Amino acid sequence: MEQVEKDVEDWIKPYATIIGDKNNVDINLRETKPTKYFVRKTLPNNFESYAIILHSFWINHKVIEDKVAEAKNNNLDLPEEEFTRTNWKEFYELKGTSFELDTTILNSVNWKYPFKQMNNELFPGEGYIDEEHLESLIKNVYELYGSQEIEVFYTFLSTQTWEKDLIFSGKITDLRSLLKKEELILTPSLIYSKQRNWVVNTDYDLSFSTIGGERELIDRLVKENKYEVFKVEY
């Protein structure tokens, strides 16, 4: 993809991390219906359908059981290739805890999980959507709309230098190569089609992403990513 010198499109800019100013969402929704609250905070109300994409938990099953203990240092350099993706529902069940979407979303935002993190576990990455979810997005967008033109926004906090925001332009299939650039340490903050018929928002402070789009696209993603992508009312 080609880096371009421009600003985020006006229709999505108010919802973008750091530069956005979408602050008029009913604060009471944050406690009573957090899924709806965060969708409204991060996406405009002009799409047919909406969903939340949960970033995965990860478990290292190679750690010997009697070596598993409560994690004391979250900054340890762990061998990520030894970890296996686990969706939130499965992880909660492994912990003997019931899974309910709104409750778990609020727990993640408040960093008040109902269980302790162990030294063989990685909790969902903030600002880091799973590559598998992005691959699912690429595939389904291509099948529905062809080689669609997109723009990709990285907040400066998602780059190696932390100097400035970056915007790239290209085809949906070009997104794969962009994700491999070493100077981009997180996944995109915004991905949206130039046709304005879908957008993905990955806030650097949240362990989930939000997506708005045409109903068929959202339905495909929900079906293809069971217990990972959940449809949400705006």
Image: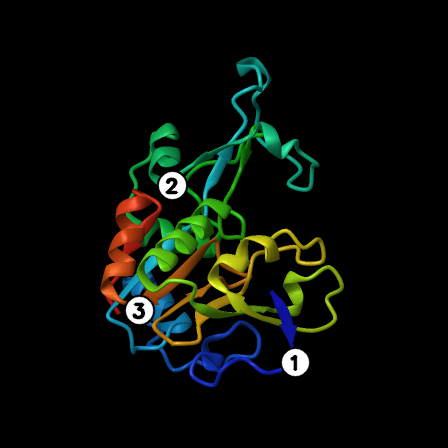
Of labels 1 and 2, earlier in sequence is 1
Residue 108 locus on image (x, y percent): 44, 51
Of labels 1 and 3, earlier in sequence is 1
Q: Does residue 143 appear anywhere in the picture? A: yes
Q: Is residue 126 above or below residue 152?
A: above
Based on the displayed image, in which of its 4 quarters is residue 95 positioned? top left
Residue farthest to the bottom, as pictured = 10
How far is the residue under mark 1 from the one under mark 3?
37 Å
SS label for mark 1:
loop
On residue 86, the disc is: none
On residue 88, the disc is: 2
| Amino acid type assigned to the residue bearing label 2 in the image | Trp
How far is the residue under mark 1 from the one under mark 2?
38 Å
Label 2 crowding class (10 Å Cα cut-off): few <14, some 14-19, many 20+? many
| Quarter of the rendering occupied by the N terminus | bottom right
| Quarter of the rendering occupied by the C terminus | bottom left
Residue at image coords 61%, 69%: 155
Residue 219 locus on image (x, y percent): 24, 55
Marks 1 and 2 in Cβ contact (< 8 Å)? no
Marks 3 and 2 in Cβ contact (< 8 Å)? no
| Amino acid type assigned to the residue bearing label 1 in the image | Glu
| Amino acid type assigned to the residue bearing label 3 in the image | Leu
| Location of mark 3 (residue) | 29
Residue 26 versus residue 57: which sits nearer the camera? 57
| Location of mark 1 (residue) | 5
